[in-house]
Image (spheres, coloured by chain):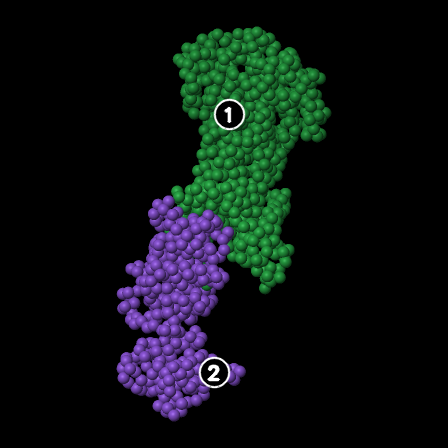
Chain colours: A purple, B green
Amino acid sequence: MLAENPSSQQKLHLLPPDRCRDEALIEMRDIVKTFKTPDAEFTALKGVTACFFKGEFVSIVGKSGSGKSTLANMLTGIDHPTSGSVRVENTHIHKLSENEMSRWRGKNLGIVFQFFQLMPILTLLENVMLPMAFCNNCGAVEREKRAMMLLDLVGLANMADKLPAAVSGGQQQSAAIARALANDPPILIADEPTGNLDSRSADEVFDIFTNLVEEGKTILMVTHDPGLAQRTHRTLLLSDGELINPWVAQALPDLSHSHMLWLTHRLKAQTLPAGVSLPAPALFLVTAGNLEINNHHSDNGFGKIAVRPGQASGGALHRLNGNSQPGWQVSTGSPVEILTLDDTDLQSWLENDSAVSHSLAKDILLPGVKVIDVAGQEHAAAGDNFQEESR
Amino acid sequence: MARPRTQKVFSDLWGNPQRSLLVLASIVVGLFAIGVVGTIYVIGPQDMRVSYAATNPANLTVLATPFDRCLVNHIEEMPGVRQAEGARTFSTRLESEPGKWIAIDMKALKDPGQMEINQVRLVEGVWPPGEREIVVDQYRLEDTNAQIGDLLTLELPSGKTRQLKLVGVVQDLSIGANGDPGGFFNSPVLGYITQDSLEWLEQPLPKQYNQLFVTLEGDTENPATLEAAAQAVREEVKHCDVEIISMVQRSSTEHPNLYLVQAILAVLVVIGLLVSFLSGFLIANTLQAIMNQQMQQIGILKTVGARRLQIAGIYLLLSLMFGVLAYLVALPLSLLVGFQIVDYLTVQINYVFYGPRVVLPVVVLLAVIAVLMPQLSALLPVRQGTRISVQEALSGYSQSHPPERGWLDHQISRLRNYSLLLVVSLRNTFRRKGRLLLTLVTLTLGGAVFIATFNVRISLVQYVDQIIQYFLADVNITLDRSYHIEEIEEKIEEVPGISMVEGWMFARTELIMDDGSIGESVSLLAPPASSPLIEPILVDGRWIQPGDRNAIALSELFLEKFPDLDVGDTIRLRVNGKETDWVVVGFFQMGGKVSGYSAYTSYEYLSELVHQTGRAMGYRVVSQQTDMTLEQQNALGKAIETHLGQSGIQVIDISTGKSLTQKASDGFTILTAILLFLALLTAMVGSIGLAGTMSLNVMERTREIGILRAIGATDLSLMRMVLVEGALIGIISWLMASAAAFPISEIMSDSITLALFGSPANFAFTPTGFIVWLVIVLILAVLASVLPARSATRLTIREVLSYE
């Protein structure tokens, strides 16, 4: 089931597990990773399940310590899960030995590191040739030709004989990308590839990635930069070792990650048939179909608005400006799939954390809701714009 | 709780055991070498002097025509004489195996139990022997194939045999003190009997002595005292109508084999210093690597306010602690090994070891070096490390020197189409040129000394083999008396396979000095002037020629003692009691000090001089078969002896050409054993250097190894890369060591032979040392590379990349 949100280019996946298994290029299932330290155990990943499809450009975003690099390590085989499985095409990489993993990785995966990790004693050309030498791909002369072609692809043909320390960070990263492509792997994993670059170099690197995706590569990129993440096909948001529901991230982007995660744990899926009108859930997110939310007491000045996939609303959200306004209804013209939070949970959430109200108010679609900031100024909620459109 | 700075030092010490062990090993090996050498240097000569002096050694040893007790008493009453004793010595043969006879020198004393001069030390059994019993010196006991309680069969002058019971084994430290050529190492079996056994052994004049031992009062270390006493004794002996055949002077502490120990010590000191020097290189190398690894920490220290001197203090304290730890390990170890070596040498060089003890000079010296060496070695790396800027330290990038590719890098690049992995190995080999240089220096010098040891051994053997030039006969025979040469030649030629027989003369003479005093004892050999059985190695002048009358050729030792002596000069010798003048026609080389003062003249002239024309006691026999083995020569000798015996002609000594050189070579076994020990020590230094370098190289590249695995390198390809790097360093060092081995071999050979023989050796080399070192260095290179590479490949990539 795929939905498009007009406000971004991103696609959101919520496929049933069997379809994930059948169609995905990469499948991660119930990945747990626990690190043992002298003082205690620390679980970096707490049962992550995700899949990735051919030709996708996916960003993995999260704050420092969220587990995104650990997740990337699971995908590259640099580290192994404590439990769970990782399948790439037909290979269960979590079962491979270190040696087998090295061999597999050389042929099937290209890795781009944050700190480039080029061999300092080899020229850029030689660095790019190195993976081919390990995998014994093609003859020596052809290796050099291919390496030059790859360097040309990333704009470094004239720097081929330079040592890494003699070129800029952006150029080193470009060379690292060329190295990652040496054996023409179908998948590239990039861990904070722009983390050590200035914005211009970061843009250049990102453009290279975009071009590669257009050529059919699958790229998974770990990043802390939400701006870059937005430019990918899809974003996985990690918080405290768990994946945040992408609909939550899409619909309520102003929530903190911990709030999003809280919500991820508590939302329940529900399907509304076509042609019904019923009391609006306290808080809901639309994941498929369209519905309208309105208030029957129309004389109070509230109208109705459409809520589309990737958007949030809710009948209890008037509490955000201190009012309790009953009577909100949702009506469907076609089957609609939603994620709902019941009133009790919402109530306790709002009461326990005052910051939630502020963030929710920015994102929800509900006519007449106003947000009062710390200076005491009133602002219209997000829904007011739509209210104008629907009128 | 320790101060943070001190805590850091301890953390650095214990935090990386492998690295710390490397530093410790580097210091320990240098301290160990100094400790061992120092122990031997202090204890060896000390115990030699003390143990020799404890035997109350003779200051004058006189060999004379038979004399009685009366002369001994007379000499003892002379002013300046402390004690005098007489002994009867003679040579005969002992049956070591059925049909095999070996030479034995016998010493008969009136009352061995009351012997005051040249006292012996009981090793096993009983002392003194009773009548018809014998005690043997331990050095050649093995040659007798006998043990306490066995009966030894001796040959009598009549040809009959008698058996004496072996009742004891002693150690006689005076062996070699009488100035016989070859001294202790060439000495035959030495047996001690009572004078009462002489008649039973058919010795003539059983109540008379032929050897006088005299100890003196006053300063016996002073040659003038000895010389004066020698003259007085000589006059007195002459006065009693006794003829002196030879007289040797010796101080009370000058052990006969001291010259050998001095030669060994000279080599030991040089190599000990070399090992320490190399150890300093190792320490500097390793500490430099530590500083490199600590770069980031240094940057952090600077950011929190540490000044350069404070940071330097931390690392100098660390190196001091390394020094202290190394001292605690090296001191007992070196003393232990030093004592073991000193103990081992007691039988080989004939002295007594008085047991392990505190060797204060070594304890103090090692302490000083343990403190100073690491500190001095650390100075430069610490200085360089603490000078780095915070930015460079934290980022790891140097702004001052942008990287450039040199000529070597470009040449290496040419190989990338052949094997890129080889390029990686080559680049890694030359990556840290300073460290590579230090490693190569230690490996090269260590290897060169190792190889040189083999070459020195060959040089020594070849030098000793020179002696064979003077004994080209297959068999050398000494009869019980002079016979007509023609008669003996005819008899010997009846034995099948004989090609040639020559009669030679021999005389013990004394040099008469310009002032008329008696000088050195000189062994005078007289082959026929045109004898083909001698091929002298001349250092000056010419050899004896047919027609020469009083011509004499002298051994090179004369040049050392009498530097003004020249070809054409005249010397005076007392031959058979008669003083005669001789014209020096040449000087020859024949084993230097080992062979003693020897000279050659023509048989024709000497036989005429001593009224023995046409007669001789000594004969040289050549077989028709060339290049006989030792066994073949022995068999021929036995056949000749049997045949002569059947004709009633008694042989009192028979030796083969090859056995003479083998005996001389055996004497150098000790020296070469010590040389080999030191060679192994220098090789160990080189090995630690290589192991350390490879270990550090791999440790520093752990992250790169992780990256290589991340881009497809298997364990095997990683191992190969590291192995090639190690092997490259090994091979380069081998080539350099091989080149350096030539001059070092020459220097070592010359030093040793000068100390031993008084003249430098001709340089010789053998491929054995080169090949053995190549194998060792390659094995070391493999081990030094594989072990750290294995531990690096065992780490997970996540660990080495240190993600999050």
Q: Amino acid at mark 2?
A: His
Secondary structure at badge 2 equals: strand
Looking at the image, can residue A282 be seen?
Answer: no
Name the residue beneath numbered marker 2: A379
Q: Amino acid at mark 1?
A: Gln
Bin the neighbour count of mark 2 within 10 Å (Cα to Cα): few under 14, some 14-19, many 20 and up: some
Above or below residue B392? Residue A46 is below
Q: Quadrant of the C terminus of chain A?
A: bottom left
Q: Is residue A18 left or right of residue B467?
A: left
Above or below residue B510? Residue B281 is below
Front residue of B279/B69: it is: B279
Front residue of B761/B155: it is: B761
Q: Residue furthest right?
A: B79
Front residue of A111/B502: it is: A111
Q: Which chain is mark 2 on? A: A
Q: Which chain is mark 1 on? A: B
- Residue drawn at x 65%, y 29% is B251
Residue A382 locus on image (x, y percent) = 42, 80
Q: Is residue B441 left or right of residue B559?
A: left
Above or below residue B728? Residue B202 is above
Q: How many marks?
A: 2
Q: Which numbered tag is attached to residue B462?
A: 1
Q: CA distance from mark 2 to mark 1?
A: 108 Å
- Residue drawn at x 48%, y 61% is A200
